[in-house]
Image (cartoon, grey):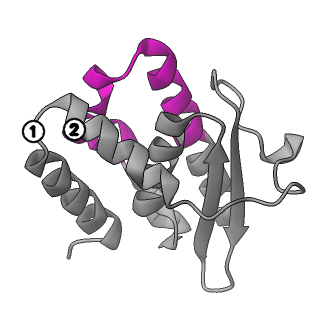
Amino acid sequence: MTRPIDAALAELVDEFELLGDWEERYRYVIELGRDLAPLTDAERSAANKVLGCASQVWLVTQPQADGTILFRGDSDAHIVSGLIAILLRLYSGRPAADIAAFDAKAALDKLGLSEALSSQRSNGLKAMVARIQRDAQAVLG
């Protein structure tokens, strides 16, 4: 059975393939970031800040009673906001076990993000994924 997280990845891969070059894909990623729900000033706290990112990045983790986790996030950089939006499409609303088991590196390679991003952005993206997976592990106990 296909997990919803795998279906979300397949959908993103299809969307990226429809776009030709990386210039178009960057514009699309930035557009995705514009649709993020804003965080409150209180949510832009040190506790929610993702360390290891060159830009300011905040990630809010909200475990749900049914074992899923909702994530919300924001950044002060447009492209990073778009990367957050991609991660939220993959992870938010999914069971903690699926999040913890998901091979994020393979997923990001499928999207071509690994080659397309600067090393600094790639490191920030890895830091965001590590934080999401660590939060999922914490929910699992």
Residue 59: in magenta span: no
Q: Is residue 105 magenta?
A: yes
Q: Quadrant of residue 71?
A: bottom right
Magenta: main secondary structure: helix
Magenta range is: 103-130
- Residue 37, x across and y down, in percent: 61, 65
Q: As drawn, is 40 to the left or to the right of 77?
A: right
Q: State the image coordinates of residue 45 (x, y, percent, origin top left).
A: 87, 46
- The reply to whether the C-beta atoms of the residues labelled 2 and 1 are less than 8 Å apart is yes
Q: Is residue 109 above or below residue 36?
A: above
Residue type, mark 2 in image? Glu
Circle 2 SS class: helix
The furthest residue to the bottom: 66
The disc placed on residue 87 is none
Residue 24 - label: 2
Q: Which residue is drawn at 72% across and 57% down?
A: 60
Image location of residue 95, percent across then percent down: 50, 72
Give the residue pinned by disc 1.
20
